Amino acid sequence: MSEALVLVSHSGAVRTLTLNRPQALNSLTAALHAELRQALDDAAANPEVRAVVLTGAGRGFCAGQDLNDPAMLPDAQGKVDVGAVIEAHYRPLVLRIQAMPVPVIAMVNGVAAGAGANLALCCDMAIAARSANFIQAFSKIGLIPDCGGTWLLPRVVGRARALGLAMTGDKLSAEAAERMGMIWQCVDDDQLAATVQALASRLAAMPSKALAATRRTLDEAAQMTLEQALSLEDHWQRELGHAHDFREGVAAFQQKRAPQFKDR
Ligand code: T3D
C-alpha cells in the first residue's frame, strides 16, 4: 500500500497534519490536495480536535503546485488549464482553512514557495524555523500569486512589499518575514516543534468558537465601513454572549479557576 500523502497525528486536543511528499518538497498534487481536504474535514468534524497544525515532512514546508503533476500536462492545443486546477483544488483548500472551527497554525519547517507560501499565510498563525524561507515563485513561471495570495499578501505586508515580493519572486528569510509582520514568529530550528506545540495546546484550551469568529470578523470587517464593522461586532457578541463559553469564562474568572471551554 502506498504511504499516506498527509500524515495525521495527535497530541491531546492538537491534531497535526504533515504534508508527506518530501522528495518533491511537499509540492501539491491532485491526490495530496484530496487527502488534505479530507484530513481538514475530519479535524473539523471531530469535537475533540481543538487546534490544527499544518507542516511538511523533510526539509521543505511546501513548494506549491507540483509542476510535474498530470494536471500540468498540456492538452492537444498545447495549453494547460491552470484555472481548472485553481477551481478544483486551491479555492476549496483556502476556503476550507478559513472556515475551520478551530485555530490552524502553520509550522513552517523549511522552504515555502508559490502556493506553499500562501498556504502558510492562509493559516491563522505561522511560526517558521529560522532556516525556512518564503518565495512568491509565481512570477518566475508566468503566473500571479494564488492560493489566496492576492488577497492575503497585501493585507499582511502592505501593497509595496507585496508587489516587491510577488514581482521579483525573491527568497524572503523567516527572520525578514517576522520583521515585516508576514508571520507570527521565527524561532531557532530546534525550538520549532516545541514552540508550535505549546502555542497549539494553549489555543486548544481557549474558546474555539470565539477564536473562529475572531478570524471571520477580522477578515469580513476589512471590507467594511466602521459602521458596518460595529454592526458585525454587535451581531457576533450577541451570539457568543448567549453561548456556553462566555458564561464559563466569566464564571471561571469570578471563581478564580481555570475555565473549561467546549463550544465549537
Ligand atoms: O495549475 C497551477 O499551476 C496552479 C497553481 C499554481 C500555484 C503554484 O504554486 S505555482 C508555483 C509552483 N512552485 C514553484 O514554482 C517552485 C518550484 N521549486 C523551486 O523553485 C525550488 O524547488 C525551491 C526554491 C522551492 C527549493 O529549491 P532547492 O534548491 O532547495 O530544491 P530543489 O532541488 O529545487 O528541489 C528538490 C526536489 O523537489 C527536486 O526534485 P529532484 O530533482 O531532486 O528529483 C525538485 O524538482 C522538486 N520540486 C521542488 N519544487 C517542485 C518540485 N517538483 C515538482 N513541483 C514543484 N513545485
Image (tube, rainbow, N blue to C red):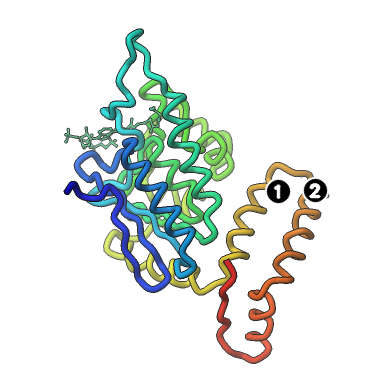
- Up the image or down, 206 lies above or below 228; here it is below
Mark yes or no: residue 54 visible.
yes
Q: CA distance from mark 1 to mark 2?
A: 8 Å
Secondary structure found at label 2: helix
Q: Earlier in the sequence, mark 1 or mark 2?
A: 1
Asked if ligand 1 lies within 8 A of label 1, the reply is: no
Q: Which residue is mark 1?
A: 221
The numbered disc on residue 228 is 2
Task: Assign ligand 1 to one image quadrant.
Answer: top left
Quadrant holding the C terminus: bottom right
- Quadrant in the picture for residue 32: top left
- Amino acid bearing label 1: Ala
- Residue at position x 50%, y 47% in the image: 96
**Residue at image location 63% in from the left, 59% down from the top:** 214
- Residue 199 in view, yes or no: no
Residue 163 in percent (x, y) is at 52, 31
- Tell me where residue 259 sits by quadrant: bottom right
* In the rendered image, the vertical position of residue 127 relative to residue 208, given as above or below: above
What is the secondary structure assignment of the residue under circle 1?
Answer: helix
Residue displayed at 62% across by 65% down: 210
Q: Position of residue 87 (x, y in %)?
A: 48, 31
- Residue sitting at the far top: 77
Residue 256 horizontal/vertical position (percent): 62, 90
> Is residue 89 or residue 233 the one in the foreground?
89
Pointer 2: residues within 10 angstroms few (<14), some, or many (20+)?
Answer: few
- Residue that sits furthest to the bottom in the current view: 255
Examine the rendered structure and indicate whether residue 66 appears above or below residue 25: above
Residue 208 position in % (x across, y down) = 56, 66
* Residue at the (24%, 44%) spot, across then down: 21
Q: Which one is in front, 55 or 13?
A: 13
Q: Are marks 1 and 2 in contact (CB under 8 Å)?
A: yes
Indicate the amino acid at tag 2: Gln
